[in-house]
Amino acid sequence: MMVGALQRMLQALQPEIDLTWLRAVYQHLKVTAKPSRDKRRAVVPAKDLYDLGIALMESADADTDHPFFAASAYRDGLITSVLAAAPVRLANLSAIEIGRHLTCRDGEYWLEFAEEETKNGAHILLPLPEHLAPYIDRYLRHHREILLRRTKGAQTPTRALWVNKQGIKMDSSAIRAQIESRTRKAFGHKLWPHLFRDCAATSIAIEDPEHLALGADLLAHDLATLKRYYNQADMLQTGRVYQRHMLELKREAARAARKDKHPNRGGRHNDSPAF
């Protein structure tokens, strides 16, 4: 990715030079380079991510003694559930503005991003779960307002959906840090925002493989790209089947060992008369 960025930077600085060779290097690296992180080990069901967000929000609402910390925790929970339900890229997630990207239509919340706002130029229009609507209402009317009170001076309140501890828009690095922290605490390892897209695609492939094409629409990708980069289902399913098989073999071996050690347990003694 750094080589690709270098190629784009050089092309912008000096458009007349021929960078065909550098583009070829970039494409070769993109195909052959090994991932720096093993996503297969980090992927969790999308439902677990959504439920984590709900649990964080409900726990925060129960904390009436520390309203500021509760507001921050509620925000993080909502970020987690929204990203699990609508796994947009981090740039879009952090850019959400109320009334522009997040709108409410007949009690249902929607996310929308114009073509010029997305990485691949695709128009995104996603409904958020009806179940999530009251949590969004609660955040907008209560917890977000608590965070906004910490804005200093006569600064105009931000329209950004995600507000930090200074009462201003959260940047993408802060959102990433909160997601990684909350998921590490819940699952024992961190999940970064882009991995939510893998979790969504993999969950669809495992739970509803006949509708894998829906995952392509959800992630604004073509199906080939979805299968190549996001679907971890095959290896995960194979691993789970293998683990279940090994566990059953282990149980059978343990039962056989107990039987050899206590051959008469549960049955009649060898010297008992046969009837």
Image (tube, rainbow, N blue to C red):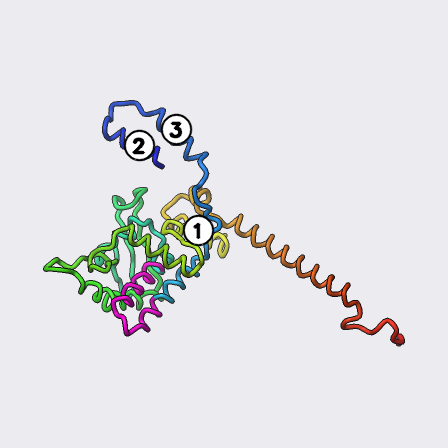
Q: Is residue 195 left or right of residue 120?
A: right
Q: CA distance from mark 3 to mark 2?
A: 11 Å
Under mark 1, the amino acid is: Ala
Query: Going from the N terminus, do you reach mark 3 or mark 1 first?
Result: 3
Q: Quadrant of residue 258?
A: bottom right
Q: Is residue 129 left or right of residue 40?
A: left
Element type at marker 1? Answer: helix
Closest to the observer, 95 or 9 = 9
User: At 31% from the left edge and 35% from the top edge, which residue is drawn?
Assistant: 5
Q: Is residue 85 above or below residue 35?
A: below
Residue 43 position within the rendered picture, expressed as x and y whole percent measured from the top left? 45, 52
Q: Which residue is mark 2?
A: 6
Instruction: Tell me if mark 1 has few (under 14), some (14-19) or many (20+) residues whose alpha carbon lies within 10 angstroms of its own.
Output: many
Element type at marker 3? Answer: helix
Under mark 3, the amino acid is: Val
Q: Which residue is mark 3?
A: 25
Which secondary structure dominates the residues rendered in magenta? helix
Q: Which residues are magenta?
A: 57-80
Q: Is residue 168 above or below residue 40?
A: below
Q: Which residue is mark 1?
A: 201
User: At 46% from the left edge and 46% from the top edge, which residue is drawn?
Assistant: 38
Residue 44 position within the rendered picture, expressed as x and y whole percent measured from the top left? 46, 56
Q: Is residue 80 above or below residue 271?
A: above
Q: Are marks 1 and 2 in contact (CB under 8 Å)?
A: no
Answer whether residue 82 is magenta in the image: no
